[in-house]
Amino acid sequence: MKRPSTPAIVFGAVVAVALVVGAIVLSTRGSTPTTLDLGTFEARVRDGEVATATLHDSSSTVTGTLADGTEFVAPYPEQYADEVTTVMLEAGIDPEIDGSGEPLWVVVLLQLLPIAAIVVAMMWLLGSMRGSGTMGKFGRKQLRQPGQGDEPDVTFADVAGCDEAVAELAELRDFLADPERFSAMGATVPRGVLLVGPPGTGKTLLARAVAGEAGVPFYSLSGSDFVEMFVGVGASRVRDLFEQARKHAPAIVFVDEIDAVGRQRGAGVGGGHDEREQTLNQLLVEMDGFEAGSGVIFIGATNRPDILDPALLRPGRFDRQVVVDQPDLVGRRAILAVHAASRPLGPDVDLGVVARRTPGFTGADLANVINEAAILAARHGEPAITMARVDEAVDRVMAGPERRSRVLSDHERRVVAFHESGHALVGHVLVRTDPIHKISIVARGRALGWTLALPEVDRSIHTRADLMDQMAMLLGGRTAEELVFDDPSTGAQDDIERATELARAMVTRFGMSDAIGPLQLGQSSAEVFLGRDLGHEQNYSDEVAARIDAEVRRLVEEAHDTARAILVEHRLVLESLAAALLEHETLAGGQLDALVAPATPRPG
Ligand code: ADP
Ligand code: MG
Ligand code: ZN
């Protein structure tokens, strides 16, 4: 097509302007009702100045007349529908509810008209310019390109409460900022890092912060985008994205929700999802197509690392995992501070108190709390956010549908605190266990709390006494629950499983039971090699089986007795440990040592 003449462009522009103006005039025709913001509207209602009101559900507006006859329209955010209704009912106004929408579609249509006019005009202009030099080509290409690389302006300072993850990612930043320095030293830098953690803990934020810190472009795609796509689209998007990243290296390729495409192949009903597999295969091919040192780094994010295809985790792909946990008390405080920094806080707001009120909240929840508080303050025309508004916001966020399942009741927190304290105390007293480094009641994965014990030296041989101590420590959690609550919970399931497995191995594999003797019973070499139970290959009689069971039971009971004796003797230490855990949520280092110190360690 030949280049459009100047008069043609002028004509197009005139038509566009005329259409827009026409649409605006149309949409505001007739008598114009005054628009009231929500705060003003509610004030009028309370003052009894509203005569009639109709609530339009689908457009989230109230229309009606004021006492003096003026018509008004008051838009409100969708989630305030209940509140708006309540306010009116309390003031004695019975609003009509308009669920349907004859006038409504007219409203919508009128609102859309200007946009439609602009689109028509643009299409006309673009159409006449296609093929006329750079502009046309540029436009077409833009439309086809997948996730554009952007340069995020977030930095590590915007992320709080996950210092360990930040420290690990700082290394990637250093590399991206100056790849030559690393390759000159012959250093191998991880190709891909998988961020693992529950939703809302800041994985996406962290990935963007790495790009922002290093000043490199950020190319992202999300696994869930591909699931509903036509076959082949996902794979070609992946290809395009990597091509872009390669061109602009050093760069970051971020694959969010990678579990949506990266699920184990061949798993699931019907042999898997074609599109998903094609996309995953393309992803693997692309990742392998990068030379080490090409300056492109992959970051993946997931909350389900357990279901990922093992191929994704091989060297050269996502070969390093960084855990992004739910924040503890200190972390929550820091996150609140980050989000409060840009907002006017009243002098009575104590973020430490807010952090204490919000166990189980993620970074996203906390960001939401501050934002809700700001909205509430603004709606009431207040100059700063007060503590009362923050409290109100916490309640709102806490009541949100996703949150409810994640928040523990006070009783549940106490149970978890005593459980973990039980592990820690038994582990501290019995010298043959690995030293306790940290205990926490901040959920991690499926665990509501956890105790971190690290070996001082790598031991390749364990004695019977070592294993008995270890078993007692495993049972320490459940035993503490029994002592304190008289009503054990389901939270000890995993511990009991591990203790029983250990006892069974002592009897049937390590020959540590005098009653059975040093025999290897029922274990094929394949099982040991694969490290998992492939069902039982019984090479002994039922009578021996019964004796094995009795021995396993005896060992578990012995360990249970050891744990109980320790916890009874040091009941006060147990109480103070649990109380400190409830207060601080995580205990480590000197603080932990000081708390357990009154209980003297001894050989088991
Ligand atoms: P994820 O990707 O883990 O689901 P996001 O990174 O999308 O979580 O977090 C959503 C929002 O919540 C972020 O944009 C940020 O405002 C807030 N947020 C989450 N975690 C943190 C954190 N650790 N520090 C500060 N803000 C956070
Ligand atoms: Mg995310
Ligand atoms: Zn436990």
Image (tube, rainbow, N blue to C red):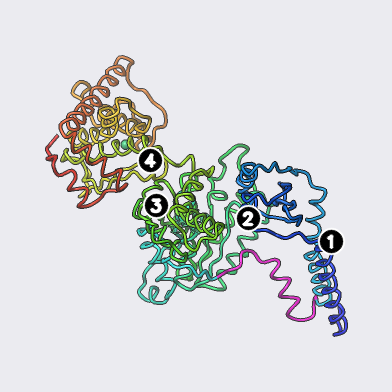
**Residue annotated with mark 3:** 354
| Amino acid beneath label 3 | Val
User: Toward the viewer: 175 or 201?
Assistant: 201
Foreground mark, 3 or 1, reads: 1
The magenta stretch spans which residues? 130-150
> What is the distance, in whole Å, between disc 2 and disc 4 at their CAs?
42 Å
The reply to whether residue 203 is visible in this rendering is no
**Residue annotated with mark 1:** 30
Answer with left or right where residue 70 lies relative to residue 383: right
**Does the magenta segment cover residue 139?**
yes
**Residue annotated with mark 2:** 38
Which residue is pictured at 79% across the width and 51% down the height?
Answer: 104
Mark 3 residue element: helix
User: Toward the viewer: 411 or 570?
Assistant: 411
Q: Earlier in the sequence, mark 1 or mark 4?
A: 1
**Does the magenta segment cover residue 505?**
no
